[in-house]
Image (cartoon, grey):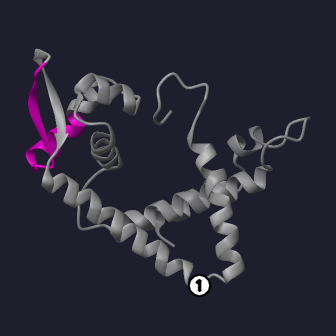
């Protein structure tokens, strides 16, 4: 267990946030214990996947920006900021290293000469593809430890986990 995992575990013993999310009177939602276990499992797995692709020194925000530009690009800075749920100055700080490393290119916006469009470069596409491949390889290796039934159960849980990604009350998609 890493120091970071130990700190996370210390928070999990009496987590007031988990208590707040415990089942309400209607019985909806997960129990406090299940919330803590799910949060810890997702957090640890995410850190392990990040370490599996450790050859690239990208922050979570930079990787998210690369993925957004790949899927929705070319994008103006303001569009990327809105999709990430952050302010334009934050996006500028996030993409500066990406442009310096040649992962994202800025090109003039043909519709508005004052604006620039952000596009993924071939190097950016190669980087995000490699990171995804390395992280998927970790999950593939780990899944070989599961029984066929456990694999089916995990596959059936994926759509449920995907439902947790979207916040219908959020004004902008992105982290809180």
Picture residue at 38% right of the left edge, 30% below the top: 83
Picture residue at 84% right of the left edge, 42% below the top: 23
Q: Position of residue 96 (x, y in %)?
A: 15, 38
Front one among 113 and 86: 113
- On the rendered structure, is 122 left or right of 30? left
Picture residue at 47% right of the left edge, 31% below the top: 173
Front one among 46 and 122: 122
Q: Name the residue under label 1.
A: 145
Asked if 11 appears above or below 141 in the picture, the reply is above
Asked if 113 appears above or below 25 in the picture, the reply is above
SS state under label 1: loop
Asked if 38 appears above or below 117 in the picture, the reply is below
Magenta stretch holds residue 75: no
Q: Position of residue 139 (x, y in %)?
A: 48, 72
Count of labels in the image: 1
Range of residues picked out in magenta: 93-110
Place residue 98 in its image quadrant.
top left
How crowded pointer 1 is (Cα within 10 Å; few <14, some 14-19, many 20+) is rated as few
Place residue 29 in its image quadrant.
top right
Front one among 84 and 38: 84
- On the rendered structure, is 170 left or right of 151? left
């Amino acid at each position: 267990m890493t120091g970071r995992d130990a700190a996370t575990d210390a928070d999990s013993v009496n987590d007031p946030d988990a208590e707040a999310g415990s089942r309400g009177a209607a019985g909806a939602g997960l129990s406090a214990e299940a919330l803590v276990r799910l949060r810890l499992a997702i957090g640890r797995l995410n850190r392990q996947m990040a370490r599996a692709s450790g050859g690239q020194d990208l922050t979570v925000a930079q990787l998210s920006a690369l993925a957004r530009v790949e899927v929705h690009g070319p994008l103006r800075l303001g569009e990327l900021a809105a999709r990430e749920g952050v302010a334009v100055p934050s996006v500028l700080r996030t993409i500066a290293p990406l442009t310096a490393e040649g992962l994202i290119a800025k090109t003039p916006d043909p519709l508005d000469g004052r604006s620039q469009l952000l596009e993924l470069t071939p190097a950016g596409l190669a980087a995000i593809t490699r990171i995804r491949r390395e992280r998927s390889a970790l999950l593939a290796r780990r899944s070989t430890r599961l029984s066929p039934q456990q694999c089916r159960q995990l596959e059936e849980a994926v759509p449920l986990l995907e439902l947790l990604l979207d916040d219908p009350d959020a004004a902008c998609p992105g982290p809180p």
